[in-house]
Image (tube, rainbow, N blue to C red):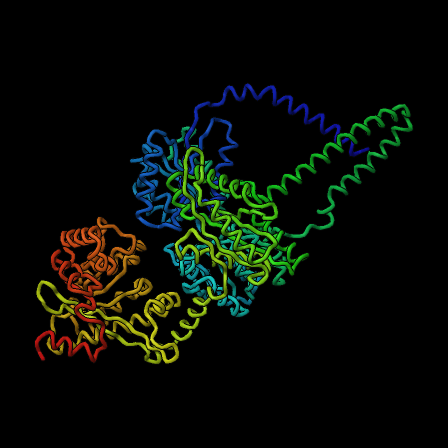
Amino acid sequence: MANSRHRTYTIIIVGIIIATFTLINPMISSSAQTDEKNVLILNSYHRGFLWTDQTVDAITEKFNQNEAYSTSLFIEYMDWKNYPTQANLDLLKQTLKYRYERQEIDIIIATDDAALEFAVTNTKDIFNDAPIIFTGVSTGNYHSLTQDFENVTGVVEEAEIEETLKLAMAINEDIKLVYVLHDYTESGIAMGKSVAQSIKNSRLSAHSISFAPMSVERILEEVKSLPQNSMILITTFHRDSRGTIIDNPLITSMISEIAPVPVFSLYEMSLGHGAIGGKVISGTFQGETAAELAMRVLDGEDIREIDVFKNGTTKLVVDYDELSKFGFPLNKIPKDATIFNKPLSIMDEYKDIVYIGISAITFLSIFLIVLSVALNRLMTAKKKLQENNIELNALYNQISASEEELKQMAYHDNLTGLPNRESLKEDIENHHRYTPDNQGIFMVIDIDDFKYINDTMGHTFGDKMLIDIAKKLRQNLKDELKLYRVGGDEYIVWCSSDLESAEGLAQEISRYFSEATHVGDSILQVDVSMGISIYPQDGSDSDSLMKNADIAMYEAKRLGKGRYIFYNDDMKSTIVERAEIEQKLRTALENNEFELYFQPQFDILKNEIWGVEALIRWKSPTLGTVSPDKFIKIAEDSQKIVAIGKWVFEESCRFAKKLYMMGYYKHTVAVNISVIQLMQEDFNDFILDTIKKYDLSCKTIEIEITESVLMKSIDDVYEKLSILKDIGIRIALDDFGTGYSSLSYLKALPITTLKIDKSFIRDMENDLMTENLTSSIISLAHQLNLEVVAEGVENLGQFERIKKYKGNRIQGYYFAKPMPEEDIIPFIDKISGRI
């Protein structure tokens, strides 16, 4: 009764409030501004990256709450983590310039560094000098990226590393080692250094150790064996050493599942995935604050008068479940910390029932008093009770409907309406629980070249294409086959069936896509790559089946796309081979298993030997001769390349000195250098000290760098190479034409020599276009005062063409193959006329 009367009064009050606002709302609306504002949200990274999605959602929600004026939001993604290239920037600039040529942008909100730099550089050319609000940029990067640009303000992102470390050591006083996980991008390396500096500044009794560049599998192996007096701090991490993209929540979940020590993080998006927590950076808060600053500018406030927001972008959060996992006490947690997943007390859990009980008792007492005084109110009270009962039933039905709606949202993809990853996981768990002996087909379907379509046609078109493909699959698949969308352009087909049915199903789906796909008014030829794993031999849970099907799908893409591949354990052979090479590589240098071969380079114009290129060879007692193509990348991932590279350079200088003592004063020795070596702080010192040790002229040494090294856009790499070039050391750009650089970009590189990749030399005999392109490369290189070396010259026809187009030098089997030191000396003597 008490509860019913209380609800009745509440309904009356709420009704009065609603009626009041209904009357005054037209007056408020009529006085609001009606001018539409155009806001561009420019994101550094891709849609689906959790940090970016949180920031964009917060900005969008903030603007949706604004009733002062109408706002049109335009959202663009640079996808900088996956495509950090100048070509990507150039294409983006052309696309945006075309897209917004007739659309005035009132303000730009740039999320993270790459977007801020692009906006500052191009706002005048593309967006008519629109003001810029930034978020997700550190203080140092904000100053360096904006410099004298005044039409900008925003939200500075500063990781409070010291606070997170103090929290960790307050919880667990035994921590002495902090293992830091970061990727080896520029921001990732900087974050690793910041952790070490924070420990030093705060005088904590601990040491930081960064995980070396390695694959995800290798990281997980390292995590298993960490000592008990350690912790893991996850910072900036997006891809492993092999380039495999993996988001922060997933790597956090994978590590915390097997780690014997606690895991902490600097980012809010790690919470709920196995991290205990920390003083975390909140993308949601930064997005809300950036939107508020933008609205101040749109309201007429001068952006130059708005200070950059520097405080309060982090919050102290811990996960109760992860604390309990390691038995850490709650009394060590600061009082201002937010603790989520904490079980409710009896009072908290049953608060409503207690309050309702007290209210009911109180009301019953009053009711009895009133009943004794005025018995005639009984019928009225009874009637009220019946009315409230009807209202309660209506409310119950409404709650039931809401629960169904929430379940629909939790288990289905918002875009296509298909079941999502959670639904897939639950279905496979049910299959494993109730019919574990029945085989099942797990098929990953990935749209080939979807990113190209998405970037060229736009995200709206891409979303419509994903919806239409989902409809196409649903219409053609049989009822017993269940279709899911698990993110991006990946669909999953799962059913209880055998291997023979899987073959037929894959062929049937391939036939669906042999016909053109209609998306709106456009007709596209869409191909898909499929990877298939079979339950239970390839896995008995969704994660294992997904991982193995993904391996097969990427194998299908590697073999040319537009096909299906069944997973088999042989696909893991490369992983086993890599592990064996990595193990033997640890002692190869100490056991003197490496040897240098030298391949001569012939000066076409002077008709003499110009010098040699030093090439490493590994002759393992157990593995035999191992190709550099197999072990160099592994050496880079394990950091062994630093020691091996120093040995190669030392031996090359020793051989250069030997040539000099034999009277070959002008001969040059070319040495290949890895990007890992270049990133070492003492790289230049080592190069110069070694040259000085052997009393050599700098002109006798040439350093060879691949295109991919220079395309990293790491400032100190450019600076180091420029210093070496200025003192006389030659810098050669190796394998030109296989990487990302363009001909026009060569003039900005600190190089002296251009080595044309052997694929151009091989094809120019039979392909006029390749021959014309090669001649153009040589001509342009000469205009830039670069010498040109042709690699892989194997016959007279190739030699004559390089000579015709005035290449400077050749290298290849036509002139000489690589030789050990004992053979190269007599060869040089013979060619030089000494024998």
Residue visible at 12% across and 77% down in the picture? 829
- Horizontal side of 13 relative to 658 (left or right) equals right
x and y percentages locating residue 466 in the rendered image: 48, 41
Measured from the top left, where is residue 401 in percent x and y? 68, 36
Q: Is any atom of residue 236 visible in this view?
A: no
174, above or below 744, in the image: below
Asked which quadrant contains residue 199, the reply is bottom left
Residue 3: x and y in percent read 78, 34
Screen quadrant of the N terminus = top right
Closer-to-camera residue (670/171) = 670
At 56% across and 47% down in the image, what residue appears?
483
605 left or right, relative to 357: left
Comparing 357 with 593, the one in front is 593
Visible residue check, residue 650: yes
In the figure, is residue 493 to the left or right of 717? right
The answer to which of 118 and 519 lies nearer the viewer is 519
Residue 484: x and y in percent read 55, 47
Instruction: Please say if 7 is above or below 319.
Output: above
**Quadrant (top left, top right, bottom left, bottom right) of the C terminus:** bottom left
Asked where in the image residue 588 lies, by quadrant, the reply is bottom left
Q: How many numbered markers are drawn?
A: 0
